[in-house]
Amino acid sequence: MNLTSLSNKELAEIISTDKYDEELIRSADAIRREHYGTDVYIRGLIEFTNICKNDCLYCGIRCGNGNAERYRLSREDILSCCENGYELGFRTFVLQGGEDPYYTDEIICPLVSEIKSRFPDCAITLSIGEKERESYAAYKEAGADRYLLRHETANSEHYSRLHPDNMSGEHRKQCLFTLKELGYQVGSGFMVGSPYQTAENLVEDLRFLQTLEPDMIGIGPFIPHKDTPFGDSPGGTLELTLRMVAILRHLFPKALIPSTTALGTIHPLGREMGLKAGANVVMPNLSPVKVRKLYTLYDNKICTGEEAAECRGCLERRVESAGYKIVVSRGDVKR
Ligand code: SAM
Ligand code: FES
């Protein structure tokens, strides 16, 4: 099965039908094994603030959600998450949060430098949204290696139905190209089954990613959050998400593709199935248990009650049961 030469129309047909699923997933797994064997890379996710100035219509921590209980982790909290994570074998830390104006460059840069000096053999990933070029450059200078910024949807009309008027998909895409220019390893991606999304939109997402050539591509099902305008919208399905993971592996043979927490939320074995469909990364949570339930992007999020060590052990077993193996490594992309 070779998807690389398909037209947009043919790709949209594959996206819309379950007819080829078995073959698609089997061949995606063969491609991942060719490049990564059975290795699964882990990233320790530190969700350090749920305060956000944005009002994305789908997101549970949008500023318009007055029911969300807000928190910020202190510098010491974040460093102790890294300490704990290092002992558990993590060699990548992902600092993710809402676009929280409190964390100015003057706070982020020294924090990144401190983590880098304490854990020089680790990669630092930031995922803190859209910033000015100067800020991205300063974070890089301070020691950040990677940046995650999902483009969400490549279609501008679709983007405008998911976001308020003051946000622009074009600006978000521009940020991604800036990050690449600055030498970051870049991760992008989108939600599967977001409101109003069509198969043609998904093809546009794939084409945009082919232009961007990111190192990592994160996708997960859209899951409604009750306190958002899309609280009653249907969520993305397991089948379509797995099909999209497999298609991504075909089109981006060497990419880092996480099997996401959202996938594990919509099905008890979602992450295992994601790995079998071509994913090669998992991102367990290192945040302190006291704040886990508060970083609620969507309803029923899993792994909000466990300590980091429990999550690590649980995931190890899950990954092995799917036929793969977690490795202790920075987990850089293969080129
Ligand atoms: N503020 C940063 C940013 O904008 O990239 C990082 C945090 S943001 C909450 C991380 C990702 O969560 C988004 O890129 C989006 O794709 C995903 N997300 C938000 N709401 C979601 C929902 N209801 N279901 C599934 N994924 C969601
Ligand atoms: Fe967190 Fe399983 S991965 S409890």
Image (cartoon, grey):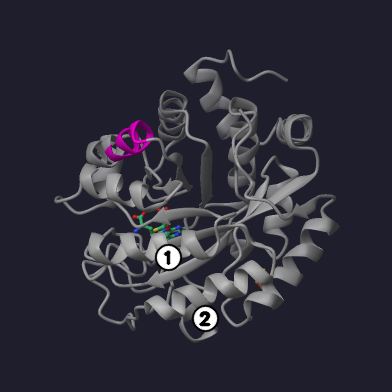
Say which element carries label 1: helix
At mark 2, the secondary structure is loop
- Amino acid residing under circle 1: Glu
Disc 1 or disc 2, which is closer to the eye?
1
Residue hosting label 2: 288
- Between 6 and 54, the one nearer to me in the picture: 54
Query: Percent position (x, y) of residue 53?
Result: 21, 65
Q: Residue at x 55, y 19 (%)?
A: 10
Residue 110 placement, left or right of 95: left
Tell me the chief SS of the magenta region. Answer: helix
The amino acid type, in three-letter code, at marker 2 is: Pro
Identify the residue position indicated by label 1 in the image: 114
* Image height of 197 relative to 282, above or below: above
Q: Nearer the viewer, residue 127 or 28?
A: 127
* Res 42 quadrant in image: bottom right
Category of crowding for the residue at label 1, using alpha-carbon neighbours closer than 10 angstroms: few (below 14), some (14–19), many (at least 20)? some
View quadrant of ligand 2? bottom right
Residue 59: x %, y % from top left: 35, 63
Residue at the spot 47% in from the left edge and 64% down from the top edge: 115
Residue 259 image position (x, y, % from top left): 63, 52
Q: Quadrant of residue 88?
A: bottom right
Chain part drawn in magenta: 175-182
